[in-house]
Structure formats: C-alpha cells, structure tokens
Amino acid sequence: MIPFNKPYFTGKETHYIEDAVKRGKISGNGDYTKMCQNYFETTFGFKKALLTTSCTDALEMCAILADIKQGDEVIIPSYTFVSTAIAFIRQGAKVIFADSEPNNPNIDTSKIESLITSKTKAIVPVHYAGIACDMDVIMDMANRHDLLVIEDAAQAICATYKGKPLGSIGHMSAFSFHETKNIISGEGGLLAINDERFIKRSEIIWEKGTNRAEFFRGEVNKYGWVDTGSSFLPSEVIAAFLWAQIENIEKIQNKRLEHWEYYYAALKDWAVTNRIELPEIPVFASNNAHMFYLKCDSLKQRDAIIKHLKENDILAVFHYISLHSSPYYVNKHDGRALPYSDRFTKQLLRLPLYYELEPKHIVNKLLSYGS
Ligand SMILES: *Cc1c(COP(=O)(O)O)cnc(C)c1O
C-alpha cells in the first residue's frame, strides 16, 4: 500500500540526538533549541521564535498572550484543524466561524468584517496547504478594529505572501513539526512573535510562568513565579532531531515542489475532463508544496476516486469536517450556513505527498479513473 504520508529522515537525526545526550543536558532551552530558534528568527525575520511541543501548544500560548478571556470572540475559518479553535475555547472564548473562499479552503476575507463585534479580540487566518490568506486585507481590517492577528501557519513553513514569509505578518503565529508536515520532529511546533510587546511575556509563559530565561541571561538576580504559563518547551532531544531537518530544509522543499509540479502538470487535462479542480496559487502567494489536493465535483465522485485508488493500493484521504458541524460545537454555532466550508468537507481529496514519493505511478492510476 502506498501510504498517504511517510516521514522523511535525513539520516542525521540520531547523530544530533546522541550529541545532545553527550552534552549532558536534555531538558529544554539548551544548545539545539537555541540553534533552531536562531535559524527561524534569522531566516524568516520573526522578532522572537520559541520551540514548543506542538503547534497546538503554540496556539495555546497565543491565546494566553492575546489575553483571551471568557466572553471574548475570535474569528476563525470553520474548515480547519480542531487546534485552531480549541486554544481559544480553553480560554473561555467563543469562536465565530467564517466561511472559506469559493475556490480555496482559506478564510474568505470578504466575510470577516460583518462578523466583528465589540467582543471580537482576534482573527486567526489558517494558511491552508501552505497557501497564503490575503494578509493585507486581514491586517488592514485588524488595525481598523484594533484586533490581533494570529496566523495558524502550521502548514506554511517556507511559504510567502507578497514575498514576506508566512508567520511573519500577524502579531504572532504558530507552526507545526508534526510528522505529517514538511519538516518534522515527531511532535513539535514553534511560536513566532512579531509584535515586540509580547516577547517578554512569551518567555515566561513558555517556562511555567517563571522568569527563568531572564535569570539565565543575568537580567534578574533570582527567578520565581511571576505569571500564568505551562511547560510548553520541548526537550533538547526533540530540538536535536529538528536541527537535522532544518539543515536539509532546502533539499526537502525542492523535492516536495518537484512532486507537486509533476502532479499538477500530469493531472491538468484529466481534471478538466472529470470536472475536478486543481489547487490555485493566488498571485500574492508562493507554493511550499505542503499538500496536493483535488476539488472533486461531488462527495460521490470523491468516494469513487478513493475507492479506485485503494483498489490500486494507494491511500488518498479527505480532510477536515467543518468545525461548525462537529459534535462539540454544533449547538454553540450561531447557525449561519457556511456553504464553501461544507463544500471542502465533502469534496476535497488529498493525494500522497512526501519526500520519497514516486508520483508517476499514482498519476497513472488516477488517469485510469474515469476513462
Ligand atoms: C497540523 C495542524 C495543527 C496542529 O499541529 P500540532 O503540531 O499537531 O499540534 C494546527 N493547525 C493546522 C492548520 C494544522 O494543519
């Protein structure tokens, strides 16, 4: 069976993990953590980068930093992973779901403004498949209404909006290194801060509400409990693993892009014949080849393609069930119809995409569907 995802190991991961062990310090915020954070800050221009144990954790830190409280409202797309919502729900907020664009699972920026109320605190765009949301429109709206923008950049490493790295535009952002993402550490994530007002507090929340980071830099002469927080930082074992991936990030990205472009070129005509749409990359966005998806013409067609591929030992998978219709939130949602979010729930299909993929075989099997 050709899997949907296969984590890629560069070969250096265990070498760096062994080195971390030899250095004799495997708790968090050691040499490898600092190397990774420094890489992200210098490469993507974040004012502060903090490794976390997941993107979910990074989003939870964002919700704390944004001071989200009971009764606040946060606008997020419905077509997203549950973590985008849960970080804010746990702080007592109400999430207000916005619809996707007609042809792209990203939040429809033209639908956001009418959802803003006096309770709204933040907008959380999700760059689905690593393809940028229209950030100028979102930032402008946020500035006019005095809202924070938190980018869910879980899938968006190395992607850009008008040449700017995703995750560097909103006030803060969250990335994932889960084994299904482009660069990985098993579980893992990153909080990126772009608004300097949040830097000091982010380090405190990261280390269980203590000012430990300041203490170790010699900026205060004792450390203690000064704020809320949790244990959001990963161990050096995870950071060492991630370092091997970072070293190979260009090679990984090039290979993924090669596969993506192969799929696109080879499936273009077939898609038209079968009334299937391929992903569209807006002119303001670059492609980080996180995902290759098909927009099928119906649920029935998607089921048939999944079945056809399965019979050929290929695993293709659908993606999110719109959060506004999930069992946990269906009764809390305000009842607005979100037709495009529902469209992608029923019609989006993801093809296998990973470093060691041989897309030719998958394409050949797909081309035999419908003919
Ligand atoms: C993967 C993903 C997450 C969660 O990432 P974890 O590192 O597994 O916590 C959140 N949001 C989106 C859009 C994702 O794709």
Image (spheres, rainbow, N blue to C red):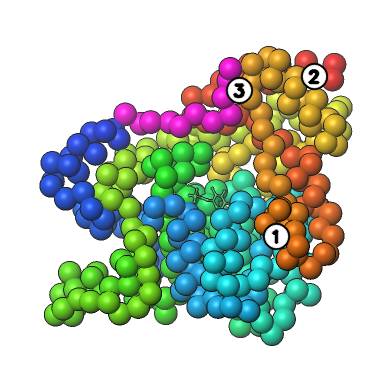
Task: Estimate the x, y position of residue 250 in percent, counting from the top left.
Answer: 42, 40
Q: Considering only vertical position in the picture, is 14 above or below 135? A: above
Q: Callout 1: 10 Å neighbours few (<14), some, many (20+)?
A: few
* Mark sitting earlier along the chain (1/3): 1
Residue 303 occupies quadrant: top right
Residue drawn where x is 39% and y is 42% of the image: 185
Q: Amino acid at mark 2?
A: Tyr
Label 1 vs label 3: CA separation?
38 Å
Q: Considering only vertical position in the picture, is 141 above or below 128? A: below
Magenta part of the protein: which range?
1-11
* Mark sitting earlier along the chain (2/1): 1
Mark carried by residue 359: 3
- Report which residue position mark 1 lands on: 329
Task: Estimate the x, y position of residue 144 in percent, counting from the top left.
Answer: 66, 82
Looking at the rendered structure, the secondary structure element under dot 2 is loop
Q: Nearer the viewer, residue 269 or 306?
A: 306
* Mark sitting earlier along the chain (3/2): 3
Looking at the rendered structure, the secondary structure element under dot 1 is loop
Q: How many marks?
A: 3
Image quadrant where one finds the N terminus: top right
Q: Main secondary structure of the magenta part?
A: loop
Task: Estimate the x, y position of residue 266 in percent, counting from the top left.
Answer: 70, 25
Q: Is residue 5 magenta?
A: yes
**Residue 209 visible, this orientation:** yes
- Would you say the residues marked 1 and 3 are in contact, meaning their CB atoms lie under 8 Å apart? no
Q: Amino acid at mark 3?
A: Pro
Residue drawn where x is 16% and y is 78% of the image: 222
Q: Amino acid at mark 1?
A: Tyr
